[in-house]
Image (cartoon, grey):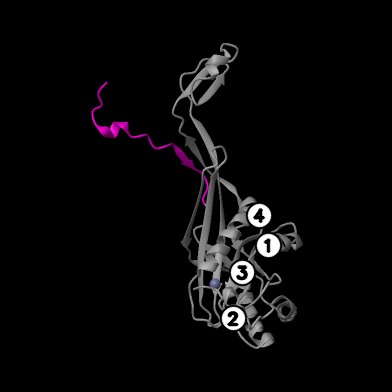
Amino acid sequence: MRFKSLSTLKRPKPLEIAFADLPQKIAMAHYARVKAYKINELVHTIHGDSFEWYGYTLAKSHTPELIEDIGLPKNDQNLQDYTTIGPSRIAEFQELLPRETIINGWIHSHGGLNYRHFSKTDEENHLTMLNFVAARLRKPVAKREIAIQDSVMLVKGQYENKDLEKGSVCFITDVPVSTATIMETVYGNFCYGIVIGDEGWHEQVIYYQERGILSGHTTIRSKPAKVVFVDTGRSLSQSDISALSDEVEVKIQPNTDPPPEMIERM
Ligand SMILES: [Zn+2]
């Protein structure tokens, strides 16, 4: 047998049909934005200096892409330039949330530092967060063909065990068929990452994970994202601020004498 050209030997691209999108921008309520910068301010007033802190971005489960609020967990340690997140801490915090509230990412502050990018430590935190929120935010985003090299078609009641020894995958159907295509559901999820600074700047990233339910094929990617502020009708009241100030007092624990290995590597 002769091929016209080598290109005919290329494996065809698996069929993929996308039917849902993951967010390309970050939608955030004005309330959440104001609250984040208020935390910076309160950290400075209450603890006497700028310290890194982190919190979770929160959404309602029926609108998982919209950040409506910031949740402040008890931070393990707050140094001037270091913040870390552990999965058990996230789980602990999630359990305290009302049923309809979900975590869709995290936000942290570089305080008074003019380092306006995500650091190596931040990247590790993004992946920890992505992994945690994956199960709660996943949705079917596509159907993708599973390419099978040598499948064998068998008919129910008309094959023997030795027929099963052939091929990599057997299809057993009730009527004779000659070809079949398997399309697996690809689940996708996202996780937001936001970093802010005392001077009012902010940077954002979205992490995405996609996983084929049958093949287990998983991809992770990320991209810098714009933030779009949305008016949800809620504003930070005086009583919100005094409650927040109590939270900042107990949940942020400045450690001004960190061991050198704890300092965030930028
Ligand atoms: Zn950072």
Question: Within the image, what quadrant is residue 256 found in?
Answer: bottom right
Lower position in the chain sequence, tag 3 or tag 1: 3
Quadrant (top left/top right/bottom left/bottom right) for the N terminus: top left
Comparing marks 2 and 1, which lies closer to the viewer? 2
Per the rendered image, the range of residues in magenta is: 1-21
Element under disc 1? helix
Lower position in the chain sequence, tag 2 or tag 4: 4
**Identity of the amino acid at label 3?**
Thr
**Rendered residue at 23%/28% (across/down):** 4
The quarter of the image that holds ligand 1 is: bottom right
- Distance between the alpha carbons at the discs numbered 4 and 1: 21 Å
Element under disc 4? loop
Q: Is residue 178 left or right of residue 156?
A: left
Check the image and report above or below for 91 versus 204. above
Check the image and report above or below for 84 versus 144. below
- Distance between the alpha carbons at the discs numbered 2 and 4: 37 Å
Lower position in the chain sequence, tag 3 or tag 4: 4
**What residue sits right under mark 1 in the picture?**
90
In this rendered view, identify the residue nearer to me: 245 or 86.
86
Q: Is residue 18 left or right of residue 1?
A: right
- Distance between the alpha carbons at the discs numbered 2 and 1: 22 Å
Lower position in the chain sequence, tag 2 or tag 1: 2
The answer to whether residue 163 of the structure is visible from this angle is yes
Q: Main secondary structure of the magenta part?
A: loop
- Distance between the alpha carbons at the discs numbered 3 and 4: 29 Å
**What residue sits right under mark 4 in the picture?**
62
The location of residue 42, given as percent across then percent down, is: 66, 83
**What residue sits right under mark 2 in the picture?**
80
**What residue sits right under mark 3 in the picture?**
84
Comparing marks 3 and 1, which lies closer to the viewer? 3
Crowding around mark 3 (Cα neighbors within 10 Å: few <14, some 14 to 19, many 20+) is some
